[in-house]
Amino acid sequence: MTVKSLGNPYSSNSDLRHGADCGCHSCKSTTAPAAMSSEDMLERAVESAVVRSVFGGSDIQRRSFMGMLGGGTVAAALASVFPLEQAKAAILDNLGPPEKTDLNIGFVPITCATPIIMAQPLGFYERYGLNAQVIKTAGWAVARDKSLSGEYDASHMLTPMPLAMSLGAGSIAEPYIMPAVENINGQAIVLSNEHLDKRDPKQWKGFTFGVPFEYSMHNFLLRYYVAEFGLDPDVDIQIRVVPPPEMVANLRAGNLDGYLSPDPFNQRAVYEGIGFIHLLTKDIWEGHPCCAFAAPLSFATELPNTYGALLKSIIDATQYASNPDNRVEISEAIAPTNYLNQPVTVIQQVLTGTYADGLGEVQRVPDRIDFDPFPWHSMGVWILTQMKRWGYIEGDVDYRGVAEQVYLAADAKKVMTELGYDAPDVTYKSHTIMGKTFDPAKPEEYVSSFPIGKG
């Protein structure tokens, strides 16, 4: 089997951001490389990763530099200081051709899924020898069930989901792994315009809020937020599970007073003139995880080369999305009907962080959403504390054991390092949520520290 690969990294005419069959303006003017074997493609991927890392991920700078000095000169200079052939040989020794190249990957149409979605039109799956199809999915229950049934090889999931699925919370118990986070931040609390005079959460008693899934950061952050203002989320407000694409319609119909949702539906409410952004969730917890790439443990054990190639695709795409200079291009790539089906301007406001807030102001928050693939074990422990706090899991919890079993930080670090990206040397750190420090070494003490909760 042969596959199309990315262009020559030493050519000023090659756009390494896209696949060989991309139809964008820049790629139409570039001659696509001849069909390559999987091994040749992996070697090219290594070369591209090294060259891109030299230029800090900027393809514009790389192409300009190659045009000035010539690709041959740059290749010779790089070879004199970096053991490129040895690096290619080492990776090929550790990762053979994918056992399975045709993959189905589920996604819910939200901007948190940006790396998984954009990896198809921008050629990241193809770069690592995969013919992956991303499949739009209505909501998280459907994504979970299709993943459990084997209809999806892997899926975009909420970071609490693989923890819950591994524990059998809300579904049958099935060992799941989460080797990469998709995005950090990227959520907001939206209120209906009918509540412009109710900016104080203490005024929200009796409100009905939407969240996209029970086992979601959205649910846990909303619960945390209102509880800090003295409201019991199980008594003083009503929380309903609403699939993200249905959030705006339910707000317009008056079925919801507000929601804590992934974008672009927060910005879409402003765009439609029916809601305003009360708070970005980054103001609750700066750098909190949101969505992730997850798969059954069996996928990694039975198809290790395919798993490795897919993880490389996802992490490479996530790092590309982390560069603000790429956000406008990405917005255009993921806007079409088969992906997010949203106006480009709405997506750009989310990804660039320059947005109308629905209160008459234009805000500039570059990290309104950001992208970092590293799955911190301490984040997994925090999520488990909230599952315990609100009664989703009971009894003794092996917080560290579960987090380390599901969140595969070692796999993420290995791939990030191979691709030339920085990765942390530790997997636990403290986090600050609404001014309160979470120490992952003391989870039970943390759970019992809250006056409102069930745990």
Image: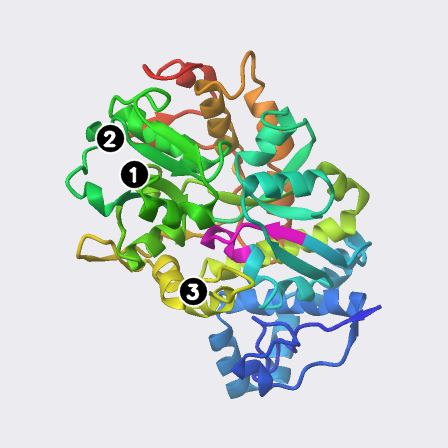
Which mark, residue 342? none
Picture colour scheme: rainbow
Q: Crowding near pointer 3: few (<14 within 10 Å), some, many (20+)?
A: many
Mark pair 1, 2: CA separation: 9 Å
Mark 1 residue type? Asp
Q: Earlier in the sequence, mark 1 or mark 2?
A: 2
Mark 3 residue type? Arg
* Image coords of residue 154 (percent x, y): 67, 47
Q: Earlier in the sequence, mark 2 or mark 3?
A: 2
Which mark, residue 204? 2
Between 113 and 151, which is closer to the camera in this rendering?
151
Mark 2 residue type? Trp
Name the residue: 38% across, 45% down.
250
Q: Which residues are magenta?
A: 105-115
Which mark, residue 257? 1
Name the residue: 76% across, 59% down.
102
Q: What quarter of the picture does the C terminus occupy? A: top left
Residue 196 against residue 385 in the figure, above or below: below
Residue that numbered label 3 is attached to:
327
Question: Do tag 1 and tag 2 residues touch (Cβ < 8 Å)?
Answer: yes
**Could you tell whether 303 is left or right of 241 in the image?**
right
Q: What quarter of the picture does the N terminus occupy? A: bottom right
* Image coords of residue 421 (percent x, y): 55, 55
